């Protein structure tokens, strides 16, 4: 059974700092992995989607990498801003139907 | 604008009553719905998968008689929490997949509902 964990569970950094969020999954047979952002009491905002054949994806200040063999993905946020404060979730698709198994989340707070 | 409409966005109900949550696709058709719930400070947990015209498949530990899913069309799925209790208080999110017509613009976030905050008192 696929299990997805995220480290750290919470993170507080000063504005401008570069940071890395980690995601681990136990079953390397994934079709894709996606990173989401969730603001308090809100739904999900998709950040980056990495297909199993890809190594990384970039969007603006965000860069996500995928290493299937080691069961890891990282989300790199450059020059963090207070507006980046949110919970970040990674989710693995092991069925090819976007039936995601979500990670435990990292609550990020960027201090002004 | 949003391509998935989930309603209501929040609801407070008395213990023992039932609550229906609707999830509509506004400008596309899709076959499959995933229903998730999220308890405070926890991640999203898949509750059930439903396909249009078929019975839903529930994840282990989710009571099918308590969480009734009706997926009668390619644009509407409903989740009814029956005889709700305080422990059912949670954030419920729907997600469409299995797109078959009129792909919406944007990325896959477009397929998630905005979520329903259920509080049972």
Image (cartoon, coloured by chain):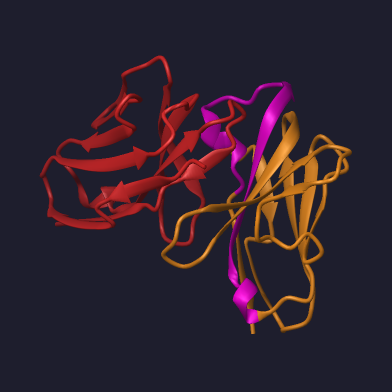
Residue A6 horizontal/vertical position (percent):
32, 48
Q: Is residue A59 positioned above or below B55 on the image?
A: above
Q: Residue at x 78, y 59 (%)?
A: B64
Q: Is residue A22 left or right of residue A97?
A: left
Q: Residue at x 22, y 37 (%)?
A: A77
The verdict on residue B95 being magenta is: yes
Q: How many marks?
A: 0
Q: Residue at x 79, y 46 (%)?
A: B56
The verdict on residue B53 being magenta is: no
Q: Quadrant of the C terminus of chain A?
A: bottom left
- Chain drawn orange in the picture: B
Q: Is residue B118 left or right of residue A73?
A: right
Residue A1 horizontal/vertical position (percent):
52, 42
Asked whether B83 or A15 is in front, the reply is B83
Residue A20 horizontal/vertical position (percent):
20, 40
User: Where, by quadrant of the figure, is residue B1 drawn?
Assistant: top right
Residue A75 horizontal/vertical position (percent):
27, 36
Asked whether B40 or A104 is in front, the reply is A104
User: Where, by quadrant of the figure, is residue B2 drawn?
Assistant: top right
Q: Residue at x 66, y 51 (%)?
A: B59
- Chain drawn red in the picture: A
Asked whether A17 or B44 is in front, the reply is B44
The span picked out in magenta is: B86-113
């Amino acid at each position: 059974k696929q299990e997805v964990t995220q480290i750290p569970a919470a993170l507080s950094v000063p504005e401008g700092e570069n940071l890395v969020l980690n995601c681990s999954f136990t079953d390397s047979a994934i079709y894709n992995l996606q990173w989401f952002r969730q603001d308090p009491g809100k739904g999900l905002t998709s950040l980056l989607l990495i297909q199993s054949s890809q190594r990384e994806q970039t969007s603006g200040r965000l860069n996500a990498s995928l290493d299937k063999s080691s069961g890891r993905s990282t989300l790199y946020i450059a020059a963090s801003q207070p507006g980046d404060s949110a919970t970040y979730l990674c989710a693995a698709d092991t069925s090819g139907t976007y039936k995601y198994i979500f990670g435990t989340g990292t609550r990020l707070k960027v201090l002004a | 604008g949003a391509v998935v409409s989930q309603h209501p966005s929040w609801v407070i109900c008395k213990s023992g009553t039932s609550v229906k949550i609707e999830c509509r696709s506004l400008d596309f058709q899709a076959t499959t719905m995933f229903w998730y719930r999220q308890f405070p400070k926890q991640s999203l947990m898949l509750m059930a998968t439903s396909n249009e015209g078929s019975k839903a498949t529930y994840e282990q530990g989710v009571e099918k008689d308590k969480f009734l899913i009706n997926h009668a069309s390619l644009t509407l799925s409903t989740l009814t929490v029956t005889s709700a209790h305080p422990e059912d208080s949670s954030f419920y999110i729907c997600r469409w997949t299995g797109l078959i017509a009129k792909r919406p613009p944007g990325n896959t976030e477009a397929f998630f509902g905005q979520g329903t905050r259920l509080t049972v008192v």
